[in-house]
Amino acid sequence: MSVLSALRELNREQRHTVLASFLGWTLDAFDYFLYTFVIVTITQEFHARRTEVTLGVFLTLAARPVGALLFGRLADRFGRRPVLMIDVLLFSLFELATAFSTSLTMLLALRFLFGVAMGGEWGIGASLAMESIPPKSRGLVSGLLQSGYPCGFFLGALANWLLFDHVGWRGLFVVGALPALLVLYIRRKVPESPAWEASQAAHGQRSLGEAMRGHWKLAIYLMCLMAAFNMFSHGSQDMYHTFEEVNLHLPTGSGAAFLLVALLNLGALAGGLFFGGWSEKVGRRRAMIVAALLAIPVIPLWTYGGSLLLLGLGAFLIQVMVQGAWGVVPTHLNELSPDAVRGTLPGFAYQMGNLIAAGTATAQSWLAEQGAGLPLVMSLWIAAVAVLLTLLVWLGPEARGVRFGS
């Protein structure tokens, strides 16, 4: 089944819900990745070391569990739709405020606050979409939702390429406030989750402890799983533009640098859609394992291609596999989560994994500075994490096709 066929089987309200959730994650990622494109420029403006500026990446990722827990609990108590609107407004406002940073300390503090708001979006958007569609559509829609992340990465690269020379890094963060307009669409077109309404009618509001009784081992497993997933994605993406500038000598805003990032994100889009849909046939775990393992033989092309053509092919293929594995994650986590905490648990597990993996960019930068160089560090990182991820998925449970709200 193609994505268009799957979407045609949804009614109008379901399509609006899927689109809003996709756009929320796309624009969230757009705002996040703008920072990674201007690390070198910020380093020069504030006369700081690159490792100090990459703390902004760490702080954003480290703050996301706070937002996932805060906004997730609000979504479980008051509904997915209103809390999602508040969350989108907040991360847009903090993105705008970043443009007016007068010091590196102020900038890092604002990236932390942005991370809190960013932490709530994924879990709420994914649960709202997954709870609103038929079970047979979850795999493809999961891949579509997760493809919002590389789409946001692509839009960030496009904005950097087209606008950086004209507006500078501060102007990019002003542009990053545009996602606030999504709230108007959600308010007009997106209904509340029927599964959340059914769960409220059947069980009412329960404390987190009551709702999680008997599920704490699952929560710990999901956090470990998402730590590996986040080391997989951030290890292949966050330092990639720096790799372009430092090792490939492609200046920020250049057409060649944009082309590589564009190919990287096209691969991510294709991988998320393919493996997400494929998981409906072969199962969630098998699809994720195959994608993770296939990343390993692609690594030499990705970092040691030797020419723009081969590097572009490597960038495309590595993200087919990395985001292919990720394309199954939204439905996998939501299917494993109990009804009463589906607004909280998937997002919190995801963002706790982010917290564990938050030092990825800083660790890669530090290791590279010790003499290993970014290409070798990034290569070994992805190979090791692919093996770790495969083991964690293989050892875990699966709940493909489970009913929500019953």
Image: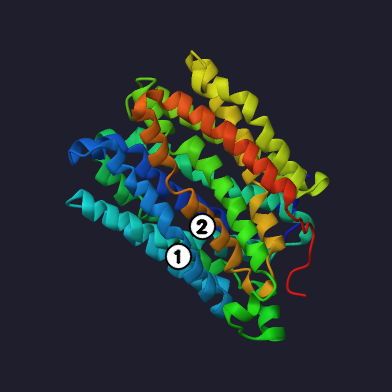
Q: Is residue 266 placed above or below 119 in the rendered structure?
A: above
For the residues labelled 1 and 2, the Cα–Cα distance comes to 8 Å
Residue highlighted by disc 2: 351
Q: In the rendering, at what x and y percent does residue 119 appear?
A: 47, 60
Q: In the rendering, at what x and y percent does residue 286 appear?
A: 77, 43
Outermost residue to the top = 306
Residue 191, visible in the rendered structure: yes
The circle drawn on residue 143 is none
Q: In the rendering, at what x and y percent does residue 257 appear?
A: 41, 26
| Residue drawn at (63%, 63%) of the image | 219
Outermost residue to the right = 281
Secondary structure category for the residue under label 2: helix
| Residue drawn at (62%, 51%) of the image | 225
Disc 2 marks which amino acid? Answer: Gln
| Residue drawn at (53%, 74%) of the image | 73
Quarter of the figure with the C terminus: bottom right
**Image check: 163 left or right of 68?**
left
Q: Is residue 380 placed above or below 309 in the rendered structure?
A: below
Quarter of the figure with the N terminus: top right
Disc 1 marks which amino acid? Answer: Gly
The circle drawn on residue 67 is 1
Secondary structure category for the residue under label 1: helix
Colour scheme of this structure image? rainbow
Give whichever of 317, 84 is nearer the camera.
317
Give whichever of 128, 248 is nearer the camera.
248
* Residues at circles 1 and 2 in contact by the CB criterion of under 8 Å: yes
